[in-house]
Amino acid sequence: MGTGQRDLRVVVVGAGMAGILSAIKLREAGLTDLVVYEKADRLGGTWRENTYPGIACDVPSHLYSYSFALNPDWTQSFSPGEEIEAYFERVAHEYGVVDDICFGEEVTACDWADGRWHLETAAGTRDEADVVIAATGVLHHPRYPDIEGLEDFAGACFHSARWDHDVALEGARVGVIGTGSTAVQITGAIVDRVAHLSLFQRTAQWIAPMDNPAYDEETKQAFREDPDRLAGVHESLSAAFEGFSHAVVEADSPAMAAIEQACRENLENSVTDPELRERLRPDYRAGCKRLVLSADFYDAIQQPQAELVTEGIERIEPAGVRTTDGRLHELDVLVLATGFRTDAFMRPMAVTGRGGRTLAEAWADRPVAYLSISIPEFPNLFLLNGPNGPVGNFSLIEVAELQLGYVLQLIDRLRDGTCREISASQAATDDLEEQRLEASRHTIWATGCRSWYLDDRGVPAVWPFRFTRFREEMAAPDLSAYDQA
Ligand code: NAP
């Protein structure tokens, strides 16, 4: 039982999708003493940082929306990145949380002392908070490939998440390294603009077919007039994705087999040249790597000016990329669509918990948090989209909403005075981790491929249970899993 209402100060780190969500929901819950620190000068997170041609979300827009701010005006089933960024801007304004954001403030240190978090930013701002919510995103530290000579390239060279829009692609010889979701979207978007496109494929990808129709004005008007209809679309998409979540965690399920069959048929039916088809055919199961969805990739790679390069990269030279067969692929522009460092989370922020325990110590082996949310000995610090959560081909908005609903229930205990400090116990964290490792072995992600889902041991660093279990866990915290003081 609580001993009385306490006013809490909450700091949110990051003004991307999850940070904006936090500010809105904290305000709604009456927690108005809050600030969101954002390192950049604009909100939007991944949608601010990634501006490469073809960027879109491959989760349908009517699902990739806050459940409380559905958008009748999405232009397409899978709307472009720009539109998604504008959506977050609009929602943040409409819900009055933009003034809660301090831009240009990168939190560098976060220390637990005397029952509060003491924060410091790169600009020298100091602050204190009772609760910190780390809404720092998952895929935001670009991973540059370790290829000899990369810095010698004479043309323009940039990572997909640092796109240089001053570089003209028209008439240029462009190389793209990588065949993940990003490279596939870039390929489809630029192939018609360039003189020559060399796509450097280290590993072939399964591509699931995807239809991306535009919504006509009549449909949008119907959504505007009937919010229930819009909510129905959101709900049915959510249910469909829940079905997908069951397939991927049960590698031998009929549902997984059906997804694999759809990918195989897509390859067979879309690529006419048998030699190219075989070079595009992965030697592992569909869904093992994050499934790539695309409406135009196979078409793009069959264009006369496109070339799929499957020889390995030997080194990069001033004039282009030298492959292991000795050939020099001459290029004007080189795009590194080589993914992200996926185990950083809120790092490089230096976080020190109870008793001087640092995050670097706690995560010396690899990142772990109870239910992705709470770390033992780091009281009143909550992560959104933290380690080992449901990240594969799901709406991270839905995930963050569920997590935040859970976190607010923990915060309530601090607020009503039931406790002043709360963090997951080591025992509960270890126990869940053990269950997670066991369940991971049955997932599609563990069927033999290299992917960013795998940790340093080759164990999928994701939620390996059904999404239904995630929903149930998030509905109400099991308080026996928490140390409370
Ligand atoms: P990624 O899936 O990690 O793919 C990186 C690619 O770069 C892979 O093809 C990898 O080859 C290749 N690569 C890395 N280092 C290389 C090297 N040294 N030499 C040659 N090739 C190298 O990265 P991503 O495509 O940026 O996507 C990351 C994640 O972002 C996605 O899985 C997804 O979760 C998210 N995303 C989502 C969307 C969306 O529509 N929702 C769009 C883009 C991205 P290997 O396969 O051989 O490792």
Image (spheres, rainbow, N blue to C red):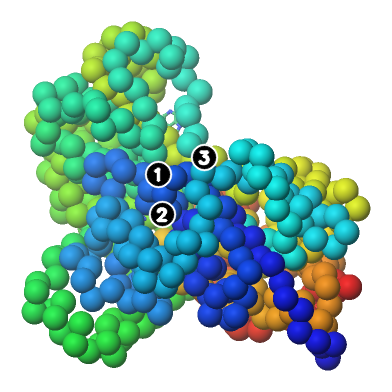
Query: Helix or strand or loop: what does disc 3 sit on?
Result: loop
Q: From this view, report whether residue 302 is shown above or below residue 484.
A: above
Q: Residue at x 47, y 14 (%)?
A: 148
**Label of residue 44 in the image:** 2
Left or right: 312 as drawn, with respect to 353 = left
Q: Residue at x 60, y 73 (%)?
A: 32
User: What whole-number distance in Å separates the C-alpha atoms at marks 1 and 2?
Assistant: 8 Å
Name the foreground residue: 172 vs 27.
Answer: 27
Query: Helix or strand or loop: what does disc 1 sit on?
Result: helix
Q: Amino acid at mark 1?
A: Glu
**Residue identified by numbered label 3:** 141
Sequence order check, earlier mark of 1 and 2: 2
**Residue identified by numbered label 1:** 49
Sequence order check, earlier mark of 1 and 3: 1
Q: Amino acid at mark 2?
A: Gly
Which quadrant of the frame does ligand 1 lie within?
A: top left
Check the picture and name the quadrant holding the N terminus: bottom right
Left or right: 89 as drawn, with respect to 230 = right
Q: From this view, report whether residue 102 is shown above or below residue 6.
A: above
